[in-house]
Amino acid sequence: MARLVSMTELEDRLQCPICLEVFKEPLMLQCGHSYCKGCLLSLLCHLDSELRCPVCRLEVDGSSSPPNLSLVRVIEALGLPRDPEPKICAQHRNPLSLFCEKDQELICGLCGLLGSHQHHRVTPVSTVYSRMKEELATLISDLKQEQKKVDEHIGKLVNNRTRIVNESDVFSWVIRREFQELHHLVDEEKARCLEGVEGHTRGLVASLDMQLEQAHRTRERLVQAKCVLEQFGNENHHDFIRKYHSMASRSGKMERKKSENLQKAEKCAPTGPASLL
């Protein structure tokens, strides 16, 4: 299948290798390369020897170069624009139409024939431009391939990140569920222990409350007995002496009985926090 040529490529192929403009009155040398009539005459004026084609370096006869009518018809049919400001060689004041492959510089036709670039391999600028455009296209293609690889790597990283986040969410859910079950078991054990402590405490407190009630009753009796004794102390001498002996005997018996009851209560009462366990 024939490749379609763009207008830019076609315009490049219709440029004079010397002036880099669209051909004006193109003349064809015996080697097959064409040049503007004015460019070829200017080249002949600067030569002291035989003319060599600036492109292929073959010796040619510039005075017998016929017009290239095919190029003229193609240029007229396409109506191609011309470059109004071609780049000029600072030494020969001719357009920079060639590229020195050795020195990697743009040169004019006279630089390749008479100047420091003699016998160097030169290429028309249009050819170099097309070649470099192809190299640029290859470089862009390589960069696209590298970009594709990077995009694939980024996609893998994103997938790995998503997978890790999802797995982390699953693990977090499992851990929370397990700890909820552990908390439930701990709460049940805590409730059982608290209930046991509270029940034991209630029993001890009830026992102590009963003993306190007994102690308060005993204290009330003692207060009453003290009041009676204080009143007895106000009796006259004869009555006091007569009643004191029988009252002291009853009081001694009551004190011994109270002391025994108090000792029994102290033995039964809890002595510290350890009794709650």
Image: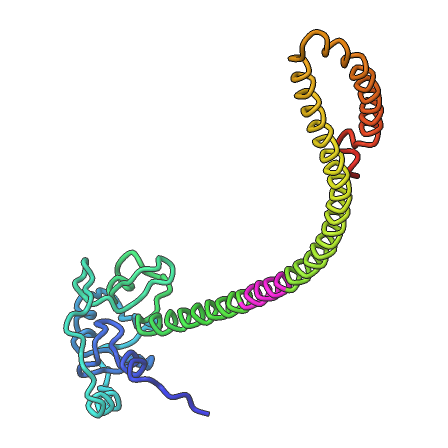
Decide: is 28 above or below 207.
below
Residue 240 is left or right of residue 91, and the answer is right
Question: How are the residues colored?
Answer: rainbow
Q: Picture coordinates of residue 37 (x, y %)?
A: 18, 79
Left or right of residue 22: residue 231: right
In which image quadrant can residue 201 be found? top right
Q: Quadrant of the C terminus?
A: top right
Q: Is residue 148 left or right of residue 12?
A: right
The residue under the point 17% across, 70% down is 42
Q: Residue at x 73, y 39 (%)?
A: 205
| Residue 236 falls in image quadrant | top right
Return the x and y of residue 36 as percentages of the image width and height. Answer: 20, 78
Q: Is residue 161 magenta?
A: yes
Q: Is residue 117 above or below residue 33?
A: above
Q: Is residue 200 above or below residue 157?
A: above
Count of residue discs: 0
Q: Is 59 within the magenta? A: no
Range shown magenta: 155-169
- Secondary structure mostly seen in the magenta stretch: helix
Report the front residue among 234 and 34. 234
Asked whether 96 or 235 is in front, the reply is 235
Camera-side residue: 263 or 147? 263
Q: Residue furthest front?
A: 238
Q: Position of residue 258 (x, y in %)?
A: 80, 24
Residue 56, horizontal then vertical, whole percent? 35, 72
Q: Residue 223 occupies which quadrant of the picture?
A: top right
Q: Going 31% across and 74% down the picture, which residue do you hit?
A: 126
The correct choice, above or below, for 39 with respect to 235 in the image is: below
